[in-house]
Amino acid sequence: MKTLIVGAGPGGMATAMRLAAAGYQVAIYEAADRVGGRMRGFELGDYAFDTGPTILQVPRVYEELFGACGLDAYDYIKLIRLEPNTRIAFWDGTHLDLTSNIPAFKEQLARFGPDLSAAFERWYIEHLRKDKVGYGPYLGTPVRPPLGYLKPDEVAAALPFRPWESLYDHFKRFFPDERLVYALAYQAKYLGMHPTACSSVFSLVTFLEFHYGIWHPEGGFRALARALARAAEDLGVDIHLRRPVRQVIVEEGRARGLLMADGERIAGDAVVINADFGHAVQTLLPAHARGPYTDRWLNRKEFSCSTFMLYLGVNRRWEHLPHHQLYLSEHIRRTDPLWAKSAVLDVDDPSFYVCNPTIVDPANAPEGHSTLFVLVPVPNLRYPVDWAAQARPYRDLILRQMAKLGFEDVERHIVVERHYTAETWRDEHQTYLGAVFNLIHSWQQLGPLRPHIRHRGARNLYWIGGAVHPGSGLMTILEAAKSAVHFIGEDLPAPRRASVTVGQ
Ligand SMILES: Cc1cc2nc3c(=O)[nH]c(=O)nc-3n(C[C@H](O)[C@H](O)[C@H](O)COP(=O)(O)OP(=O)(O)OC[C@H]3O[C@@H](n4cnc5c(N)ncnc54)[C@H](O)[C@@H]3O)c2cc1C
């Protein structure tokens, strides 16, 4: 049973690992010259950069992935726990360190207000229960039909958590201070949403970071990408780099293989598309096999923001500053629709995030130097910005903003630099609208209302990545890979369980 996977992003490689371990013959075809997709990274001179993810949540998900394939994750990756998890600097000059050291966190809260540490304790205990009720049945389970979510026992267990509330209202109920509300809800941005528009079910993500900490893979997320590839190859997967796919071959309603950009046809029993969903439905599927995913469908859907990125190689280190820092500008409190949707480029006081990885992972820069990764949420290409004109002034603005997180006078220290705009994500990472976090996670686009892993326009064709349930982060995509293998197994059972000799 031969399965062909388009793209060596994390989702493609995790699916490949699980399929190979289950006895399928698997080949991945990747357009780029290296694995990892949005986390493939790049080098500028002596400096090595992660491109996308910098926050690794819930190591258990990686342990389970490798474990399910008969491997030990820690033979492939070393994870470093960060302390604090993230420092949040507020518009008023104060800051808060989010940390899994709960007593230390409560002490900080006590400085923000008298009753807050008791409120946090109530919130935390509620989320120990929410994790049990929410993670397994919702995040960790293949998507069900809408009515399948109405199991009386699960509904009864979920109701006390008021899932209809917004994330903003949820946190406001516990913490009257808006600084805390926005600090604890900051993960909503990864879901492409403002906390006032995002369901409170996602407070679980905040909890998972508190409870399991935030981790950094030694060597960066580039090393994590290589680790997934090495594990896949150890399990027998063939990974072909620099092999762009032109189209999925669909005949008589079934996926039959791939037509490569160079004209070669490769036959397979099943095809899994890991390329970005919006990009792939428009370019990789023949018109007759797009199913419901017409251009009209795409136009009706809400996609996440994009990001403006600065990757800086600098001739100094900021040892005293944390690995992850986020500046929340007062504009985060604007809830008028264009601002809440990230449809406006903030040229005044944008919120932004800086990763300072060299302090825990010094190998990515020369001795005494470091790399900095700066991310600014910006409109996706549905709300056009003249990036040819804006990129340079925006870079200058962000360099000035960086002083708000303690990176003083950063421009003077730059040795190498690169920036990405929404157009770079579209053109170099084939990301529809440059919307790096994919379809947003609104009620209208959750669970069964996201594209299904089983393609609806042809048989034996599957999706893996941020567009499908449960969503667009690494943790959720790895959960989706489990579901993809479940569906492929139902449709095309593996002929036998593989007997794999790892390391050959
Ligand atoms: C700036 C940024 C910050 C992020 N931060 C975090 C974070 O901190 N934590 C977190 O968990 N997640 C984060 N994410 C999200 C995370 O990066 C994505 O969820 C993840 O990379 C998506 O993985 P994927 O498997 O969907 O594939 P992708 O990474 O989208 O990879 C798809 C692959 O398909 C290939 N491809 C496309 N077209 C073709 C073709 N025609 N032929 C062959 N190959 C093709 C591409 O080259 C690519 O390698 C971040 C993302 C970005 C962009």
Image (spheres, rainbow, N blue to C red):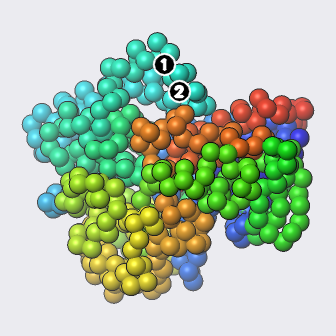
Q: Is residue 179 above or below residue 22?
A: below
Residue 183 x, y percent position in the rendering: 27, 49
Q: Is residue 283 above or below residue 70?
A: below
Identified at 89% across, 53% down, the residue is: 267
Q: Is residue 478 above or below residue 38?
A: above
- Which of the numbered marks, if any, corresponds to residue 25? none
Identified at 79% across, 32% down, the residue is: 491
Q: Residues within 10 Å of mark 1 (few under 14, many from 20)?
A: few
| Viewer-closest of 355 and 276 | 276
| Viewer-closest of 94 and 133 | 133
SS label for mark 2: helix
| Viewer-closest of 343 and 57 | 343
The residue singled out by tag 1 in the image is 150
- Which of the numbered marks, if any, corresponds to residue 146? 2
Q: Residues within 10 Å of mark 2 (few under 14, many from 20)?
A: few
SS label for mark 1: loop
Residue 260 in view of the camera: yes
Pointer 2 residue Cβ closer than 8 Å to ligand 1:
no
The quadrant of the picture occupied by the N terminus is top right
The CA distance from mark 1 to mark 2 is 8 Å
Residue 384 x, y percent position in the rendering: 41, 71
Amino acid type, label 1: Leu
Amino acid type, label 2: Pro
Q: Is residue 155 above or below residue 111?
A: above
User: Which of the four quarters of the rendered structure image does ligand 1 lie in?
Assistant: bottom right
- Looking at the image, the residue that sits furthest to the top is 152
Residue 478 in view of the camera: no
For the residues labelled 1 and 2, say whether their Cβ atoms are less than 8 Å apart. Answer: yes
The image shows a total of numbered marks equal to: 2
In the displayed structure image, the side of residue 213 where residue 122 appears, left or right = left
Residue 429 x, y percent position in the rendering: 59, 67
